[in-house]
Image: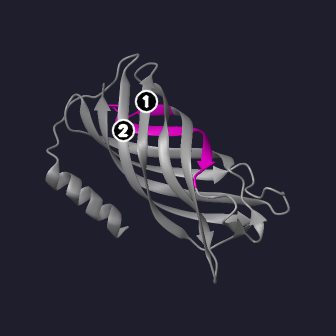
């Protein structure tokens, strides 16, 4: 909670906030480079590991169908996995999310998104296993998130959001165990209207 307070204070100190209306018209495009702090666990047959904390980063983009709805996609670097008493499993992924994004509030600066993410493993699949199980190179999962955009100008904003991911496909190549990743990210990013 302390990291959230510090992040908000830094935004208020270093970014002059003006009250511009950023309601987007049809066919508008926004790009948002972002960085965040994530906490993940893996679940093996329903039992959770210890937490794995890390930094994630990437860029997302929104294409607006109207003032309320956009489709959001992007490319994000993410570490998933977890800890046990004797080891840490850190799996590096490139995530490709596709979300329906609902913008609400009087200035449409709140959003709620839901969708699917496909994750492609970056580190060597032969070098690491969980409970003796070899890890697949691709996983899919559901994601849900919410955020708030602070308007800086008509074309620039600051986005603070939280995204939660729950693996839908197992990680075990041999399917001996049911192993999935679950966790979330608290992110901050700069929104650019193109």
Q: Helix, strand or loop at disc 1?
A: strand
Name the magenta segment's main secondary structure.
strand
Give the number of callouts: 2
Instruction: Give the Cα separation between the discs numbered 1 and 2.
Output: 8 Å
Residue named by callout 2 = 32
| 37 in relation to 57, above or below | below
Residue named by callout 1 = 62
- Where residue 189 sits in the image (x, y, percent)? 33, 45
| Residue at point 56%, 71% (across, down) | 51
125 or 119, which lies in front?
Answer: 125
Q: Which residues are magenta?
A: 101-122
- Where residue 2 sits in the image (x, y, percent)? 33, 69
User: Quick check: 157 left or right of 28?
Assistant: left
Any mark on residue 96, and which? none
- Where residue 46 sits in the image (x, y, percent)? 75, 65
| Residue at point 79%, 60% (across, down) | 178
User: Quick check: 5 left or right of 119?
Assistant: left
37 or 93, which lies in front?
Answer: 93
| Residue at point 19%, 33% (across, down) | 153
Q: Which of the image's four quarters has the C terminus?
A: top left
Q: Is residue 68 visible?
A: no
Does residue 5 belong to the magenta stretch?
Answer: no
Residue neighbourhood size for the residue with mark 2, other residues' Cα within 10 Å, grouped as few (<14), some (14–19), many (≥20): many
Residue neighbourhood size for the residue with mark 1, other residues' Cα within 10 Å, grouped as few (<14), some (14–19), many (≥20): many
- Where residue 24 sits in the image (x, y, percent)? 34, 23
Q: Is residue 20 visible?
A: yes
Q: Quadrant of residue 109?
A: top left
């Amino acid at each position: 909670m302390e990291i959230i307070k510090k992040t908000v204070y830094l935004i208020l100190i270093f970014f002059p906030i003006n009250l511009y209306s950023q309601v987007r018209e049809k066919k508008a495009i926004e790009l948002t480079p972002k960085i965040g702090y994530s906490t993940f666990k893996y679940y093996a047959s329903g039992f959770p590991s210890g937490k794995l904390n890390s930094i994630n980063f990437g860029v997302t983009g929104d294409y607006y169908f109207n003032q309320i709805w956009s489709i959001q996609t992007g490319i994000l670097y993410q570490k998933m996995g977890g800890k046990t008493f004797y080891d840490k499993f850190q799996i590096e992924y490139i995530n490709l999310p596709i979300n329906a994004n609902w913008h609400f509030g009087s200035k449409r600066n709140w959003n709620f998104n839901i969708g699917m993410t496909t994750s492609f493993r970056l580190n060597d699949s032969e070098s690491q296993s969980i409970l003796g199980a070899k890890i697949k190179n691709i996983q899919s999962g559901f994601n849900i998130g919410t955020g708030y955009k602070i308007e800086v100008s008509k074309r620039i904003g600051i986005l603070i959001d939280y995204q939660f991911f729950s693996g839908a496909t197992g990680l075990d190549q041999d399917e001996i165990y049911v192993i999935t990743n679950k966790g979330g990210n608290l992110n901050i990013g700069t929104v650019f209207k193109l």
